[in-house]
Image: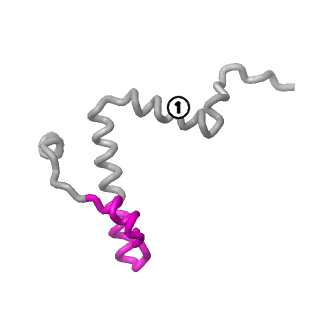
Amino acid sequence: MNEPDTNTDWQNGTWTGSRLEQLKRWRALPLKAKLDALDDLLSFSGKMLQARQAKGLPYATNPQVASTAAVSEAPSKYHEHRDQQS
């Protein structure tokens, strides 16, 4: 018979436990990494929207969803600084 695994933290195996672990790891990231991740997510969501539009697929037509998903604002100085470094 196999020996029990005593090294695994099984609290992370639940929905709540895994969510808490994700939040803990997110909080541990430096601010620059968080901002970079948000930029990547914004870029990805824009590409996905364009792909759906190009294929004629539906996308965020609910006014409540569209109003939150289609937020547009001018780039901050952070973006200018980040683009110069790349």
Q: For this view, does 71 lie left or right of residue 16?
A: left
Residue type at mark 1? Glu
Q: Residue furthest bottom?
A: 56
Using the image, determine if residue 64 lies above or below residue 11.
Answer: below
Instruction: State which quadrant residue 34 falls in.
Output: top left
Q: Which is more toward the observer, 61 or 80? A: 61
Query: Majority secondary structure of the magenta segment?
Result: helix
In the rendered image, the quadrant that contains the N terminus is top right
Instruction: State which quadrant residue 10 falls in.
Output: top right
Q: Which is more toward the observer, 56 or 72? A: 72
- The mark tally for this picture is 1
What residue is at 40 percent from the left and 30 percent from the top? 27
What residue is at 71 percent from the left and 20 percent from the top? 6
Using the image, determine if residue 21 lies above or below residue 84.
Answer: above
In the rendered image, the quadrant that contains the C terminus is top left
Q: Position of residue 42 (x, y in %)?
A: 31, 53
Q: Secondary structure at mark 1?
A: helix
What residue is at 73 percent from the left and 23 percent from the top? 5
Q: Is residue 56 magenta?
A: yes
Q: For this view, does 60 lie left or right of residue 5?
A: left
Q: Is residue 57 magenta?
A: yes
What residue is at 64 percent from the left and 29 percent from the top? 11
- Reading the image, the residue beneath label 1 is 21
Q: Position of residue 44 (x, y in %)?
A: 35, 56
Instruction: State which quadrant residue 29 falls in.
Output: top left
Q: Position of residue 79 (x, y in %)?
A: 17, 46
Q: Position of residue 56 (x, y in %)?
A: 40, 79
Q: Residue furthest right?
A: 1
- Local crowd at mark 1 within 10 Å, few (<14), some, or many (≥20)? few
Q: Which residues are magenta?
A: 46-71
User: Colour scheme used in the picture?
Assistant: one colour
